[in-house]
Image (tube, rainbow, N blue to C red):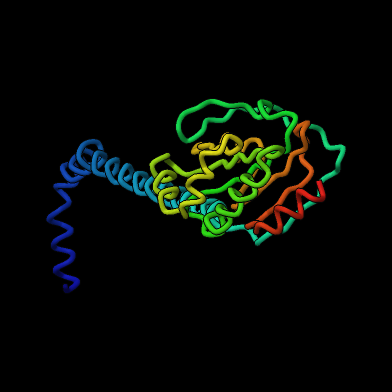
Amino acid sequence: MSVCTAMALRKGLQGHWPCLSRLRAYILAGPGIKLLTTHRRFRNGLMRIKILIIGFTVLCGLGFAMWDVVRTPAPSGQASVLPSASAPLEDFTFTDYKGGQHTLYDFKGKHVLINLWATWCAPCVAEFPDLLHIADQRSDDLVLIAISIDNDTDVIERFFKKLPDAAQTQITLDNVYIAHDPLMKITGSVFQATRYPESYLLTPDMAIVRKISGALTGDDIQSLLADK
């Protein structure tokens, strides 16, 4: 654009400055403000979505990390010897997989082997027949309480049907109790277990004398009972 053309255009617009000013004011006061407000709201909405996505991602990461800890089997057969003078466990109530209600103190006067397990835990599955066998051999002075954290009892019953015939019979022994703890009120709140299997040997007055992280063999259990 030449200088002459620019000057002519400027001169032609001079008479319209009031109209242009009013148009500018109208745009800012009306549609312009609405457009600006809409843009700001859209931008704020995007920011909120980003924050929610970041928060959701962090929570998912923590959740998967905790789940990985819970589902990771404990190292095999690591026994911790607790003080023999440890205080007795507080009594707690548990429900067996058939719906029966029991308390820990129902078994005072006998040694109790508490086993925390699940059907998806390979070491738990491997040691289960040995636990039942020992319970059968020591039926006079030992009670086995196997506490499962499986989601439903149908899974437990299907697992039992796959066991050897001898083990299926031993499940029905009077000194064997298969507890169901899907909400981890016992495994989590009482024993703070995070990996499975985990076992506890209790004295007749319900004090813990052994804590075993990992799978047990029949010989391990016999040795623990011999040293009780």
Which of 21/137 is in front? 137
Count how many numbered circles sit on residues in the image. 0
Residue at 47 percent of width and 35 percent of height = 97
Residue at 42 percent of width and 54 percent of height = 162
Q: Quadrant of residue 114?
A: top right
Location of residue 185 in the rendering, given as x and y in whole percent from the top left corner: 57, 34
Please give left or right for residue 149 compared with residue 188 in the image.
Answer: left
Please give left or right for residue 13 compared with residue 69 in the image.
Answer: left
Which of 154/35 is in front? 154
Location of residue 90 in the rendering, given as x and y in whole percent from the top left corner: 72, 28
Location of residue 53 in the rendering, given as x and y in whole percent from the top left corner: 40, 50
Please give left or right for residue 178 compared with residue 199 in the image.
Answer: left
Which quadrant is home to the N terminus?
A: bottom left
Location of residue 36 in the rendering, given as x and y in whole percent from the top left corner: 28, 44
Q: What residue occupies the far bottom of the structure in this picture? A: 2
Which of 3/147 is in front? 147
Residue at 77 percent of width and 52 percent of height = 80
